[in-house]
Image (tube, rainbow, N blue to C red):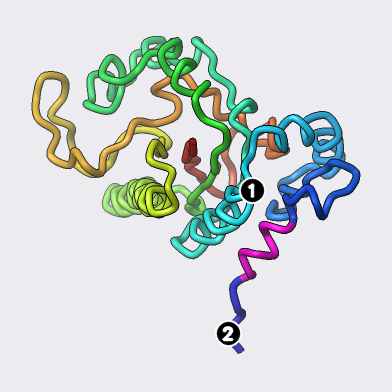
Amino acid sequence: MKKQPENPKRQADQINPANNPAGKITIYDNCNSNCNSKYKNEFLNERGGNFLSRILEKDMENVGLFLIASKEAGASDAFFIDAENIVVDDRVRLKCFVPLCRHYGDLVCPPNVPTPDEFRKYLSCYRFGIMLSTEYNNPPKPPSLAESQDVSREIRKKSTDLSEILLKLESLSLQKGYRFAAGFTGGSCHYCDKCVKTGQECKTPYKARPSMEAVGVDVVGTLQNIGVFLEFPVSDKIKWWGLLLVD
């Protein structure tokens, strides 16, 4: 029998202060096994009240809707995050130069996107976001160049899938009245095989989005702030993380 999607009202109730008399919010009930329960409890004790003072009643149901929509669109993970827990570090942008990334100069990469300082200013205007991922199960090393190219295409497709999910979430956010909602993908843009670079016209201007890293977001540190810990080097699967900022 087909499993029915979880009622967004129930997910909204999970972050409703009326249902949390101790002043805690169980926003991590949507987490998978990657979440650290000890961290979750500490976070809710220290940060829950501050978050509840900034979220509006209408947001409570919409957060649930955004999480459900992310999963239905194909996301592997979808987590709520308080905007104050998004980490911006200038050294992330430095890694675009040291070593020099081959995508430097792409239209949604440095120097064509906001600097970390500019992004911090924009980020201060947002209250919460949705962190989401797509994943590709990492196969054994391909025995031939042809198979290696096939794997590379599949990896790029998962990256583009993430961008498409973010576009759907942006659209849903606009429908719900969040007119400044903005999506940030992970890694370089893969809508074109090769970007036309600085000074040229983008071929997919309504789809291409900058990555979190391009504007200085420390993805690893940000995920740690919601109890998700990445492992390096990557072993059994590759994940791309994206962010929807909601005003």
Left or right relative to 180: residue 107: left
When asked about the image quadrant of residue 129, the answer is: top right
- Secondary structure mostly seen in magenta is helix
Considering the numbered disc 1 on the image, is that residue within a helix, a strand or a loop? helix
Left or right relative to 120: residue 156: left
Find disc 2 in the rendering and name its residue: 2
Check if mark 2's residue and mark 1's residue have beta carbons within 8 Å.
no
Residue 198 % position (x, y):
16, 20
Residue 91 % position (x, y):
50, 11
Structural crowding at the residue carrying mark 2, measured as other residues with C-alpha within 10 Å and reported as few (<14), some (14–19) or many (≥20): few
Q: Identify the residue at horizontal 52%, vertical 54% (top origin).
A: 66
Q: In the image, is residue 157 part of the stretch drawn in magenta?
A: no
Q: Nearer the viewer, residue 22 or 158?
A: 22
Q: Nearer the viewer, residue 119 or 90?
A: 119
Whether residue 193 is visible here, answered yes or no, is no
Considering the numbered disc 2 on the image, is that residue within a helix, a strand or a loop? loop
Q: Nearer the viewer, residue 108 or 187?
A: 108
Most distant residue in the left direction = 200
Residue 155, placed above or below residue 47 = below
Q: Amino acid at mark 1?
A: Glu
Find disc 1 in the rendering and name its residue: 57
Most distant residue in the right direction = 22
Q: Identify the residue at horizontal 41%, vertical 10% (top origin).
A: 98
Residue 124 % position (x, y):
52, 21
Q: Identify the residue at horizontal 38%, vertical 16% (top origin).
A: 96
Q: Amino acid at mark 2?
A: Lys
Q: Please report the bounds of the magenta region as a residue range.
A: 6-13
Question: Which circle's residue, 2 or 1, is located before the other in the chain?
Answer: 2
